[in-house]
Image (cartoon, rainbow, N blue to C red):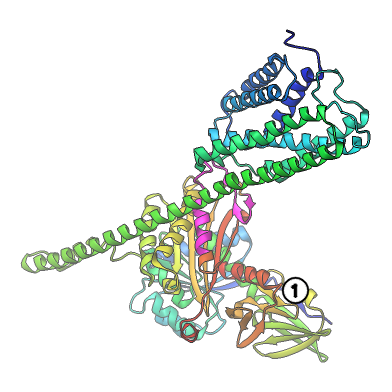
Amino acid sequence: MPGRHERLNCQMFNIAVIEDQQSDSDILKDYFQRVSKEEGRGFYLAFFSDGESFIKDVKKGKYDLVLMDIELGEMNGLDTSRALRKIDEEVILIFMTNLAQYAIAGYQVNAFDYCVKPISYWDFKIRINNAVKKIEKKHKTKVILNTEGNKRVFEADSIYYIEVNNHLLVYHTKDGDFQSYGSLKKATEEFEGLGFAKCNSCFLVNLAYVSKVEGFDVTVGNKTLQISHPKKKEFLDALNKYLSQI
Amino acid sequence: MNLYPLSSLFFYRLIFTAWLLLGEVMFLIHMKRKNRFFLRVIVALVVCFGFALAFPIPFGNAFYSMIMFFSIFIVSYLMLLFCFRTDWKTLLFVALCGYTTEHIGYEVYQGIFNLINASTNSAVTGLYNNDTLLLFSSPVEMAVYFSSYVVIYWLVFILCGIKVNGEEGSGVNKGLTLGLGGLFLVIDIVFSSVISFYSTIHYDGYYLCFLSLINVACCIAALFGLFQLFYKNSITKNLEVVNELRREEQAQYEINKQTIDMINTKCHDLKYQIRQMGNQTSLAPEVVESMAKAISIYDSSMKTGNNALDIVLTQKSLFCSQHHIKFNCIADGAALSFISEPDTYSLFGNIIDNAIEAIKNIDSQKRLITLRIKQKGNLVSVSSQNWYEGEINFKDGFPVTKKEDARYHGFGLKSIGIICEKYHGLLSMDASNHTFTISILFTHPEPNEKKEA
């Protein structure tokens, strides 16, 4: 049986808000309620008034999205984010700030986005929707495989790349390699729009794990794969597009 | 003396004029029209055909027909000047192309017809003969005539005509244009007339056929040469404008850098003096501190780890805040260290200017520019997004400008393209869902590998 993936409509999003101004927290609560009504999404909100209490609470995978005020008390937003990244390096992080220039260094902690206060609803909605799209795409796409008689479920997110060998697909994932019958063509269709691209006719690569391209070599995770001549342009275009997604 | 003998030449003048004008029209698509254009066209047609009809034909010799064709050509050229406001050199280029096209058509027809008739070895009348009224000696001749013209015109239009953009002539040397013009007329008119009349005396079908072939080859070569000169010129000119803009941007970068450095030094001095004064007066320390802070205009501005990027971002973000544009930027400036400072300044100046241009007139809530510069391994991704209204069409990967003044618009994006190419970056643009996105991917060698290489 070929690999199957599902986009589970898990409509509840766990969101942490770290904000020391009560009035700003209230505005955000109100905005989330409006987005929830308009888009039919559920949000579970957890509010923290300082970085320390948030870091005590957070665990890997506990939150889908973190909204962080940069100008916090003792432990500022950037410091808190550095601490957060040690615990959860994947959670989507959006900064809130009074001054845009404070957010410019957000790349250091892999910030997804930021909003400048006072935050307008239009601004807020666009950013939340972008983040939600990204969360839905990555975390909620499960792959169900029948491998050697056992059913296995894992997230598309955890796949480094998929290799085809005759009619056997090998899924190279964080949790090891799994095999299943299928074709790369079908897999390519299944992972459409999830940030996967073929670097040659044998490998379908999760672009999230590409860390280096040099000549016709691409490094995925800690493996180096060959890019074929005819696929190079297409592959780099896909990579360019993937990396530029905001 | 009968000035208008009723010979085939009498009618041929009009037919020739029609083909000549049609030849010219093929190159005129992108020329700039004068006002009341259609009225002018009607006047021009009346003048051209009227002139051709009024031109006396008392003699039937080569020299005289040369003068006739030349005069008709000059009148048609004057009429181009009358209808279009494109520069005279470009229009002369168009007129010469038109005439040459007509001539290729004519020579092809002559070549084929003479080949068919070569065996008869009798003097064939040709189109302009004063002895007979008949234009064509047979239906075959007529068929050859029309098919030659139609095929040649179609080919020339497809291969050359549609490429003319109306800016060809502006940079070409005057003397060269006139010299070439003269050479063309010699090929188009003089040779042909001499051959035509000589052939009525000494007819040799094969010989004439080969002469026609040579003539066609000559014309094609000439057309090709003319096109190279004018068309290439327009491309180089585009490039020159881009380069000129780049030079200006670089000069501006130097000035801005100096200004900001100077302001920073002054601010620093002022801050020091304010603190000194604060110590000597009874002002509260908070007041003194806030005064000192207020002075640091550029101190508190963008700090990305890249000088040139800091300068361009500071400048553009000031502009944006004045125009109620939200400028959202997360930038790892250090990742761009492999790009020279002036190039960084140009690249991001153009990216942001392009976005500002798109959103400055839309609903203020939607005035948002997002810029991301991030590094991952040896991959450096630059992306910029902005909302836009209306429609964007792409041609060769670049948006087609809809602005009236297409000459200078769009050069910013071309400049971005040139810089990307210089650093082997991959540039792509996208305009789906009312969001215009510029994405650039650089794969630059990591510093430690650079040493090895």
Q: Residue furthest left?
A: B280
Q: Nearer the viewer, residue B408 or B206?
A: B206
In the picture, measured across the screen, residue B14 lies left or right of residue A49, that is: right
Q: Position of residue B225 (x, y in %)?
A: 63, 46
Q: Residue furthest front?
A: B202
In the picture, measured across the screen, residue B288 lies left or right of residue B77, that is: left
- Residue at point 51% right, 79% down? B445
Q: Position of residue A48 (x, y in %)?
A: 44, 75
Reply yes or no: does residue B405 show up in magenta.
Answer: yes
Q: Would you name the residue on which mark 1 appears? A: A188
Within-10-Å neighbours for mark 1: few <14, some 14–19, many 20+: some
Question: Which element carries disc 1, helix, strand or loop?
Answer: helix
> Number of marks in the image?
1
In this view, B366 is above or below A135: above
Q: Position of residue B275 (x, y in %)?
A: 13, 68
Q: Position of residue A175 (x, y in %)?
A: 66, 90
Quadrant housing the N terminus of chain B: top right
Reply yes or no: does residue B40 show up in magenta.
Answer: no
Tell me where residue A233 sits by quadrant. bottom right
Q: Which residues are magenta?
A: B393-420
In this view, B414 is above or below B170: below
Q: Nearer the viewer, residue B74 or A123?
A: B74
Q: Chain of mark 1?
A: A
Q: Nearer the viewer, residue B422 or B339?
A: B422
Tell me where residue A229 sits by quadrant. bottom right
In this view, B429 is above or below B234: below
- Residue at point 65% right, 71% down? A137
Tell me where residue B396 sits by quadrant. bottom right
Q: Nearer the viewer, residue B378 or B125?
A: B125
- Residue at point 76% right, 71% down? A189
Three-letter code, disc 1: Thr
Q: Residue furthest top?
A: B1
